[in-house]
């Protein structure tokens, strides 16, 4: 506004002077143009702020091995920096190794990522200019249980987590989240924003590192949902049919219940493989499976819903991050299934009984606060339900409390301290949370059912330890308790990798967690039948139950929701269904 005013005044003064100069009574040369409109040299373009340069090349033209060159400008570092570190995650993840095991210095040897800095001749000299290679032919580079932190080959190229080839930066031990320019000369690299520009993608180091990249000829489709854009990406299938509706509907439920997302685009990459899995890093989601999920309650459908909900629900604590997301997953699945067919409240509540079985098999008597893996998923889901019951009685809901906790850091979700602060509005519930987290024995799901005015069905049975179920009974060396997929088999097994278990001893199976219950009455030497899907067909296997030491068949409780649901109102676990049917 000030510049426009100055310009108008300059024009007015110049016009008045010019009028006097044209008067016959005054014989003088015209005055020079005033500064406001005088010709002047164009200002030099502003120099862009300094950024770390990370250039990626493909060794031998094949994305199996990357050559990376990192240049760090001295001016981005704190004055007097003596030690610069470029670390990769070194601790093991899943069944593989840390990313540091993929990385080698350009000159050979072991990668340490530590560099002592020498004073530069000028301030513009780079503080560091080093190269390293990332070897994706490493035996650990492939998905096992999940794909959020593991690079792997697709049918058309490579799927890369940024963490596999982009390091963090530390100056004298202090983490730096500085601007970085990622250049990938390969002409077919996409991320959530689309194809990488020729001059590179410039973002903060953390944003580039916490992203997924897909190399090769792929299809992308922008899907608007929940106020943002999901870039569906694949090189393996011709149609996203099924996945589109699942993403749109799940995101709609989550935004309605847990709050909106930012408008930043998010990559959702899908690749076909024999295994099923999913993962999320930063804003991006990855999925692998035999085919695009068609139904929400299918194994890959559930994985899709769970990983998508992590856009709203992630935390620094496993029981809160994974457990609450599992509970929200059950609510979303109930609502999605209700769109297609009638679903009873008892069916939905029985899904919590499945979580009870997983927790009983894997918790090993430890309190929930100390658990990880499937036991933390299952225990955290039951904890979420118990809190939801008490919050409903107080006139609130778990979603409203979680949405309030998200307000301070909307993405990726609420930290434990933020959730506790939001929960503190309800006088008795912080103590209730601590009580449930410290529970050393079987989780009190039956008590929570009763607080929900539901009489549980309880029973005991002779279970199986997971190791004995896998190696002695089924001779399957790789499976997940929440899935029916056979991943790896032992010598002499009647199963084959890729089989899906459909029925054991006459009982339908939704996950391997149900097999011990299905075999509860089977004794040593007794034969039982297992129905499996293999390829496009089904077959029936006849197995003999082995002779097992009684100690490996512990007596376990089993808790399910009874049919006598409360007559007025509904359990909070079906609240999302109610919202859909209103």
Image (tube, helix red, strand yellow):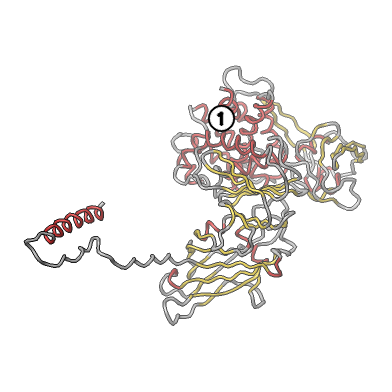
Write the residue at 92% across / 37% down.
526
The quarter of the picture where the C terminus appears is top right
Q: In percent of the image, x 90 and y 38: which residue is there?
A: 539
The residue positioned farthest toward the left in the image shown? 25
The spot of residue 247 in percent (x, y) is 62, 39
Characterize the local packing of mark 1: few (<14), some (14-19) or many (20 or more) Cα atoms within 10 angstroms: many
- From the viewer's perspective, tell me whether residue 48 is left or right of residue 339: left
Compared with residue 103, is residue 496 higher up or lower down, i.e. above or below? Answer: above
Q: Position of residue 138 (x, y in %)?
A: 73, 64
Residue that appears at 83% across and 35% down: 503
> In the image, residue 147 lies at what x, y percent?
68, 52
Number of callouts: 1
**Image position, residue 523 (x, y; %):** 89, 37
Q: Is residue 332 left or right of residue 517?
A: left
From what the image shows, is residue 218 above or below residue 199?
above
Quadrant in the picture for residue 529: top right
Residue farthest along the top direction in this orientation: 567
Residue under label 1: 389
Residue 90 makes an appearance in the image:
no
Point 93% across, 40% down: residue: 525
């Amino acid at each position: 506004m000030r510049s426009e005013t100055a310009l108008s005044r300059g024009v007015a003064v110049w016009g008045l002077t010019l009028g006097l100069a044209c008067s016959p009574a005054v014989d003088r040369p015209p005055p020079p143009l005033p500064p406001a409109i005088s010709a002047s040299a164009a200002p030099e373009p502003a120099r862009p702020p300094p950024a770390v340069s990370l250039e990626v090349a493909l060794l031998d033209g094949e994305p199996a091995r990357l050559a990376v060159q990192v240049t760090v400008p001295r001016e981005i570092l704190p004055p007097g920096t003596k030690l610069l570190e470029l670390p990769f995650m070194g601790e093991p993840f899943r069944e593989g190794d840390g990313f540091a095991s993929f990385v080698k210095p350009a000159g050979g040897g072991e990668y340490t990522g530590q560099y002592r800095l020498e004073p530069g001749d000028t301030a513009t000299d780079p503080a560091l200019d080093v190269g390293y290679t990332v070897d994706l032919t490493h035996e650990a580079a492939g998905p096992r249980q999940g794909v959020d932190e593991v690079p792997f080959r697709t049918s058309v190229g490579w799927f890369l987590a940024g963490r596999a080839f982009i390091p963090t930066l530390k100056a004298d031990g202090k983490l730096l989240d500085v601007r970085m320019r990622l250049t990938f000369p390969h002409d077919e690299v996409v991320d959530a924003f689309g194809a990488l520009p020729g001059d590179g993608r410039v973002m903060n180091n953390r944003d580039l590192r916490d992203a997924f990249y897909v190399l090769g000829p792929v299809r992308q489709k922008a899907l608007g949902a929940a106020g943002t854009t999901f870039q569906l990406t694949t090189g393996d299938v011709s149609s996203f049919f099924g996945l589109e509706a699942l993403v749109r509907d799940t995101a709609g439920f989550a935004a309605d219940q847990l709050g909106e997302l930012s408008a930043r685009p998010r990559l959702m990459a899908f690749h076909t493989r024999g295994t099923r899995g999913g993962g999320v890093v930063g804003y991006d989601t990855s999925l692998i499976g035999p085919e695009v999920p068609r139904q929400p309650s299918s194994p890959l459908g559930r994985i899709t819903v769970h990983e998508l909900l992590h856009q709203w629900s992630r935390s620094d604590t496993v029981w809160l991050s994974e457990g609450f997301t599992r509970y929200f997953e059950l609510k979303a699945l109930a609502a999605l299934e209700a769109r297609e067919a009638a679903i009873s409240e008892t069916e939905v509540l029985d899904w919590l009984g499945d979580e009870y079985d997983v927790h009983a098999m894997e918790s090993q008597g430890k309190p929930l606060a100390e658990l990880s893996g499937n036991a933390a998923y299952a225990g955290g889901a039951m904890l979420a339900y118990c809190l939801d019951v008490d919050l409903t009685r107080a006139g609130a809901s778990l979603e409203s409390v979680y949405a309030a906790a998200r307000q301070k850091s909307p993405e990726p979700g609420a930290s434990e301290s933020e959730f506790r602060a939001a929960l503190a509005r309800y006088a008795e519930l912080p103590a209730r949370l601590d009580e449930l987290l410290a529970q050393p024995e079987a989780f009190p799901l039956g008590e929570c059912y009763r607080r929900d005015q539901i009489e549980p069905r309880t029973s005991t049975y002779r279970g199986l330890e997971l190791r004995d179920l896998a190696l002695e009974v089924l001779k399957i060396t790789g499976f997940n308790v929440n899935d029916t997929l056979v991943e790896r088999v032992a010598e002499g097994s009647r199963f084959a990798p890729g089989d899906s278990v459909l029925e054991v001893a006459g009982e339908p199976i939704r996950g391997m967690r149900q097999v011990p219950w299905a075999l509860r009455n089977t004794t040593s030497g007794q034969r039982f039948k297992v129905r499996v899907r293999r390829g496009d067909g089904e077959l029936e296997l006849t197995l003999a139950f082995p002779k097992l030491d009684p100690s490996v068949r512990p007596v376990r409780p089993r808790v399910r929701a009874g049919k006598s649901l409360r007559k007025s109102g509904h359990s909070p676990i079906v609240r999302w269904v109610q919202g859909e049917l209103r």
